[in-house]
Image: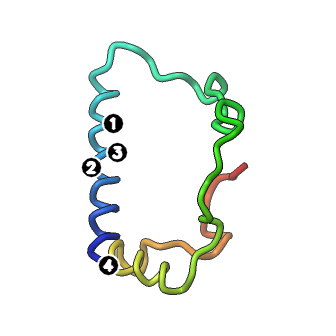
Amino acid sequence: MACLRRLVASRLQLRHTSSLGRAFSASQAPSSSNVELTSKRYPDLKRGGFASLEDSDLDAFKGVLGEDRVLTAEEDVDGEEE
């Protein structure tokens, strides 16, 4: 559980740092239409087995983020995923 909290904290710190860097950057971030998909850029890349979550994974996220901050129903998720 402590490891998960450190991971979440480091991700939040990285996201915060990245957004600050962009705020002061003179260059413009590429639009999503100009970004090459990872699967095209690295065709030999093999990803880990992260396709499913167990109830214990969801409980860990709820413990870190709070019960109302973890979405599990498909209709609660706004947007589309490719």
Residue 25 lies left or right of residue 70; in this view the side is left
The relative height of residue 60 versus residue 45 in the rendered view (above or below) is below
Residues packed near mark 2 inside 10 Å, few (<14), some (14 to 19) or many (20 plus): few
Res. 45 mark: none
Which residue is at a point 32% across and 78% down the rendered structure image?
1
Residue 44 lies left or right of residue 8; in this view the side is right
Q: Which residue is mark 3?
A: 15
What's the image's color scheme?
Answer: rainbow
Marks 4,1: beta carbons within 8 A? no
Q: Which residue is mark 1?
A: 19
Secondary element type, mark 3: helix
Marks 3,1: beta carbons within 8 A? yes
Percent position of residue 19, x then y: 33, 36
Mark 3 → mark 4, Cα distance in angstroms: 21 Å
Mark 4 → mark 1, Cα distance in angstroms: 27 Å
Q: Which residue is mark 4?
A: 1
Percent position of residue 18, x then y: 33, 36
Percent position of residue 49, x then y: 62, 65
